[in-house]
Amino acid sequence: MGFQNIAAQCSAEAQAWQAKAKKLDEQTASLSAELQKAKMRLLCGEGGSRQGCAVCAFTEDSQSSSADPDRVEPMNQACKACRNRAATLMMWPCHPIR
């Protein structure tokens, strides 16, 4: 009988952890959406029109695009914030180079 009590307790504890994990996943998704909105407001202007915004157009286009792996489109290499200079991408290794 002792093992049945332990098993029931472990089962209840596992369900509680699963519920907590689900809640944290939902919070993470919500915070990610809020972060994305904040980034868009920063780049597009607080109350400004989203029409003509290169960042918004790129985001909306990427969300509505088909899943064609052979699809190739020319890239706009202008900075998405100032649109004056070419965008720069720097890649760093995740561990020190020896």
Image (cartoon, rainbow, N blue to C red):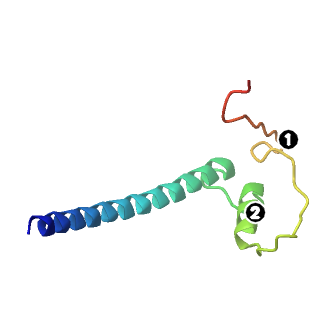
Point out which mark residue 92 bears: none
- N-terminal of the pair, mark 2 or mark 1, is 2
Q: Which numbered marker is on residue 57?
A: 2
The N terminus sits in image quarter: bottom left
Give left or right: position of 84 versus 63. Answer: right
Residue 84: mark in rendering: 1
Tally the numbered discs.
2
Viewport quadrant of the C terminus? top right
Q: At x 82% / y 70%, what residue is drawn?
A: 69
Q: Residues within 10 Å of mark 2 (few under 14, many from 20)?
A: few
- Residue 74 lies, in percent from the top left, at 91, 59
Q: Residue 48 at x, y = what percent?
A: 66, 56
Residue sticking out furthest to the left: 1
Indicate the position of residue 11 as horizontal and vertical percent values.
Answer: 24, 67
What residue is drawn where x is 28% and y is 63%? Answer: 14
Q: Residue at x 9, y 64 (%)?
A: 2
- Vertical order, 34 against 5 (above or below): above
